Image (tube, rainbow, N blue to C red):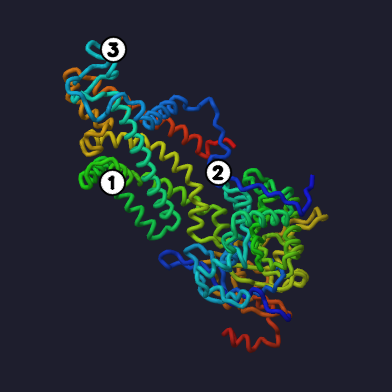
């Protein structure tokens, strides 16, 4: 890679701390990821695996109980963790934008579409209302909304779900951010609209050179949309790497299990495979690997010592003892205190 | 169908305040009578100078205690009779409407601004700000409103504008409570999150995203409060700590006329009393209707 990463997360941890400080939920734990300009990163995982918290951490819009306890987030070379709240506000919406989980409810029912799409432009660039409207008109055109001139004056309740979603997308790209985070943007849509919207996001990404972080449950979407994949389990990234290579040869048993649980077409006798057990309680994690209790390939030491990130191949990372490079094992064992 | 890409005819932005959009004012349940009554009182208050046949503050002592014109001894010069100082009751009622209207509306608005501001701050900022404002509200609500108002009036002295400030300072809590509750649910809505994620400041979010969404509730409370405030003003005037004597306020007229009631001068109290009842009742009916109309749960889209 010749160019520098756009976003580099280094050992990032976000914990939720209860009011008395007695319970700590490790929602995001020691996450390290890299994203290069124009790339798409898919983050997958079960509900409660910390995907959304990771997204909120990047924008520093966490709920009051959450703390970023360690790590760095380098965005275009600047560490977002140490920025002041005012400096963060300059980043949000302008350089990093986000599409929320429920775009259907993301629009203020009392403002016209023109005002809402133009809002980030007015906030960040101090544009006048009229010029923000003009830009909003072009943005609506960019997200393929027919007759944008009339749509500008309308209100959210006059739009269909798919249109509202595209409008939220238009708000996202209003200030031409370098990075767009989409947190399950298609869960509330039906399949045909989903496909249209994904295509639109892909087009926007290409036209504007956006980097995209795509948070989803849907591995099919990841296969279609993403260059890089990060699988999260219990707050940790258990495996990451280029999508095609991870899909072809998953290194972590959890990734394998996820891929096996996708139903396949054309085999009526096949039963759906599910992963046995429940995701762990993030406040009382087992001492070793957090997937050990459910892992089909569990080994004795998995229960005692959490595996460090290994690199099974160039550009890939897996947190599993199975991925331990044989040659490197003695030193790593000493380093992690096993022996 | 398609418009050429280079010719964009932009419509001018519509008025931003859109709280009343999408509400159908059906004729069937329209509170016509209360609106007519309030409208008449408002018109009378505005044109009091032109309508009143006599000076409301200067009487003719030779013409004291004249009954209304349809009774024996009454004249058409004093249509609703005269009081103990020979002042025309009708003229005093007409100017009294002005006092009630001005005090009612401005006190409700003052209380509304104070309460809405504090309610939004309390609900949106949360934390210690919320604690301070809500404990203050609790303390305020624990005091009997009228006694508290009398206490304040005794300190600052009677005058119409003092009454406005006092009533505003006494009744803001009702707004603060309701608005805070609304803000608590609004701030969890996705559009507020989107605004945060888009980099809006807290001030922008409170002014542009929260305030327009609570205006409906504030308007409903205001109409319901109008009756309360008018009664409170009349009570204070009746008790002698409201609008000071030469000025014609309905509560003051009741107070002045109460001795006359024992000897049969009923017109001194019945007419101002009727005016207060009609105005308060109309305000309440209108407030109820607005509450139903503006309640998004009951509103049909």
State whether discs 2 and 1 lie on one chain.
yes
From the image, tell me which residue sits under label 1.
B142
Pick whichever of labels 1 and 3 is earlier in the sequence: 3
Task: Give how far apart the Cα atoms at labels 2 and 3 are.
Answer: 51 Å
B37 or A246: nearer the eye?
B37
Pick whichever of labels 2 and 3 is earlier in the sequence: 2
Q: Which residue lies at the image location 55% right of the left edge and 76% below the top edge?
A: A71
From the image, tell me which residue sits under label 2.
B18
Q: Name which quarter of the figure residue A295 lies in.
A: bottom right
Q: Secondary structure at mark 3?
A: loop
Q: Nearer the viewer, mark 2 or mark 1?
A: 2
Label 1: few (<14), some or many (≥20) within 10 Å?
A: few
From the image, tell me which residue sits under label 3.
B70
Task: Give how far apart the Cα atoms at labels 2 and 1 are.
Answer: 37 Å
Residue B268, percent from left and from top? 24, 23
B202 or A185: nearer the eye?
B202
Q: Name which quarter of the figure residue B242 lies in.
A: top left
A24 or A68: nearer the eye?
A68
Task: Give how far apart the Cα atoms at labels 1 and 3 are.
Answer: 49 Å
Label 2: few (<14), some or many (≥20) within 10 Å?
A: some
Query: In the rendered image, which quarter contains the N terminus of chain B?
Result: top right
Q: Nearer the viewer, mark 2 or mark 3?
A: 3
């Amino acid at each position: 890679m010749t160019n520098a990463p756009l976003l580099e997360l280094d050992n990032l941890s976000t914990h939720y701390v209860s009011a008395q400080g007695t319970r700590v939920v490790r929602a995001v734990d020691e996450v390290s990821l890299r994203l290069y300009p124009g790339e798409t990163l898919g983050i997958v995982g079960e509900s409660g695996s910390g995907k959304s918290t990771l997204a909120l951490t990047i924008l520093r819009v966490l709920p009051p109980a959450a703390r970023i306890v360690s790590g760095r987030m380098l965005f275009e070379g600047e560490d977002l963790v140490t920025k002041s709240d005012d400096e963060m506000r300059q980043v949000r919406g302008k350089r990093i934008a986000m599409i929320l989980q429920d775009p259907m409810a993301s629009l203020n029912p009392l403002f016209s579409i023109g005002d809402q799409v133009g809002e980030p432009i007015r906030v960040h660039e101090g544009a006048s209302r009229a010029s923000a409207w003009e830009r909003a008109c072009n943005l609506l055109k960019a997200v393929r909304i027919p007759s944008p001139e009339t749509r500008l004056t309308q209100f959210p309740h006059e739009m269909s779900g798919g249109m509202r979603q595209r409008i939220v997308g238009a708000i996202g790209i209003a200030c031409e951010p370098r990075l767009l985070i989409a947190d399950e943007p298609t869960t509330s849509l039906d399949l045909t609209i989903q496909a249209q919207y994904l295509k639109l996001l892909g087009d926007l990404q290409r036209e504007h050179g956006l980097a995209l972080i795509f948070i989803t449950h849907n591995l099919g979407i990841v296969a279609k949309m993403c260059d890089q994949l990060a699988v999260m389990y219990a707050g940790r990234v258990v495996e990451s790497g280029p999508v095609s290579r991870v899909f072809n040869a998953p290194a972590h048993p959890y990734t394998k299990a996820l891929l096996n649980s996708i139903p396949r077409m054309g085999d009526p006798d096949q039963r759906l495979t599910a992963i046995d057990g429940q995701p762990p309680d993030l406040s009382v994690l087992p001492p070793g690997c957090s997937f050990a209790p459910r892992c089909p390939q569990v080994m004795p030491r998995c229960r005692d010592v959490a595996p460090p990130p290994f690199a099974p191949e160039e550009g890939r990372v897996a947190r599993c003892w199975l991925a331990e490079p044989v040659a490197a094992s003695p030193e790593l064992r000493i380093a992690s205190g096993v022996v | 169908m398609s418009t050429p890409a280079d010719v964009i005819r932009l419509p001018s932005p519509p008025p931003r305040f859109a709280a009343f959009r999408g509400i159908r004012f059906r004729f069937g349940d329209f509170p016509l009578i209360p609106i007519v009554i309030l409208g008449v009182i408002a018109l009378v208050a505005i044109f009091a100078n032109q309508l009143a046949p006599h000076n409301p503050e200067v009487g003719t002592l030779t013409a004291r205690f004249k009954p209304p014109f349809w009774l024996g001894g009454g004249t058409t010069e004093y249509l609703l009779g005269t009081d103990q100082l020979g002042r025309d009751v009708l003229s005093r009622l007409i100017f009294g409407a002005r006092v009630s209207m001005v005090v009612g509306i401005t006190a409700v608005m003052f209380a509304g601004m104070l309460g809405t501001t504090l309610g939004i701050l309390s609900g949106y900022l949360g934390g210690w700000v919320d604690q301070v404002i809500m404990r203050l509200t609790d303390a305020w609500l624990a005091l009997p409103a009228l006694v508290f108002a009398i206490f304040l009036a005794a300190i600052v002295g009677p005058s119409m504008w003092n009454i406005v400030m006092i009533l505003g300072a006494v009744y803001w809590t009702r707004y603060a409570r309701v608005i805070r509750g609304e803000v608590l649910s609004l701030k969890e809505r996705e559009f507020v999150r989107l605004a945060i994620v888009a980099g809006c400041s807290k001030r922008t979010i409170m002014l542009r995203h929260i305030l327009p969404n609570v205006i409906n509730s504030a308007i409903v409370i205001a109409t319901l409060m109008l009756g309360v405030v008018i009664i409170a003003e009349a009570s204070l005037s009746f008790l002698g700590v409201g609008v000071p004597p030469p000025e014609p306020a309905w509560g003051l007229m009741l107070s002045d006329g109460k001795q006359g009631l024992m000897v049969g001068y009923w017109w001194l109290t019945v007419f101002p009393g009727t005016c207060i009842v009609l105005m308060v009742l109309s305000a309440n009916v209108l407030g109820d209707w607005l509450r139903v109309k503006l309640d998004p749960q009951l509103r049909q889209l």
